[in-house]
Every structure is written in C-alpha cells, then in structure tokens.
Amino acid sequence: MMTRHFGMFKFKATVSAEEIEYCFVTMKEMIGKIPGLLGMEYGAYDSGEGLNDGFTHGFIMTFDSPESRDAYLPHPVHEKVKTVVVPNLERVVVFDFNV
C-alpha cells in the first residue's frame, strides 16, 4: 500500500516567485535521501473554480508505505528542508491517504 502526502501552501505576500520555486526544488531534493520517498509533484493553483481558500500552491509526495511516510516526518533531511520552507508560509494544510 502506497501513501500519498498531499499539501497546500499559502506563501507570505513578501515571498518572490524565485523563492517559492527554491522551496519546492529543495523539497524535491529529498527524493533519494529519504528511504521510501518515491516521487513528488508540485505546482501553482490553476483553476477557475475558486475553491482554493487562498492557498496558492500544492504538492503530492508518494511514499512506498505508511511506515516510510512515518519515518520521513522526523527525518533529519526533512527537518532541514522545513527550515527553508516553513518561514515562507502563511498557511499550510497537509492530508495523507493510502492507495
């Protein structure tokens, strides 16, 4: 059973497009460094529905198992990436599900 780790970010108004891209590139660099993290996709909100509640960007990470996701959460590489990303955020939501 694989686990999807889905998140939505609202970046602070002062954060540039380049800084946003750097955050996501830094997150994507965790692939190959954290066991069980198979892939990551991300992008800016792009829908006319207007149901994003102010969130501007989203990402989906795929883990090979719920156990790998659990090990990722306190992993030192993840903790380091959080020091880059979290200071740029106004809001964040994360939701996981198994497939």
Image (cartoon, grey):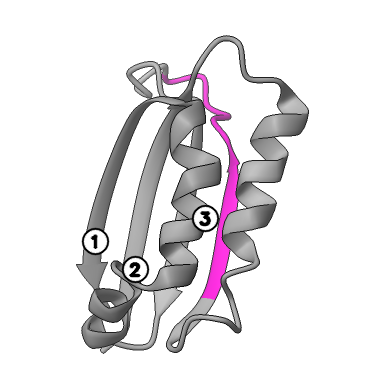
Residue 7 x, y percent position in the rendering: 37, 47
* Mark 2 vs 3, N-terminal side: 2
Q: Which of marks 2 and 3 is in front?
A: 3
Q: Which mark is residue 19?
A: none
- Residues 56 and 90: in front is 90
User: What is the secondary structure assignment of the residue under circle 2?
Assistant: strand
Q: Is 11 left, or right, of 1 in this rendering?
A: right
Mark 2 touching mark 1, by CB under 8 A? yes
Mark 2 touching mark 3, by CB under 8 A? no
Mark 2 and mark 3: Cα distance apart in space: 19 Å
Disc 1 residue type?
Answer: Asp
Mark 1 and mark 3: Cα distance apart in space: 19 Å
Residue 96 x, y percent position in the rendering: 24, 61
Residue extending farthest top: 13
User: What is the secondary structure assignment of the residue under circle 1?
Assistant: strand
Q: What stretch is highlighted in magenta?
A: 39-49
Label 1 sits on residue: 96
Question: For mark 1, does the 10 Å Cα neighbourhood hold few (<14), some (14 to 19), or many (20 or more) residues?
Answer: some
In this rendering, the answer to whether 96 lies above or below 33 is above
Label 3 sits on residue: 81
**Quarter assignment of residue 60:** bottom left
In this rendering, the answer to whether 33 lies above or below 27 is below
Q: Which mark is residue 4?
A: 2
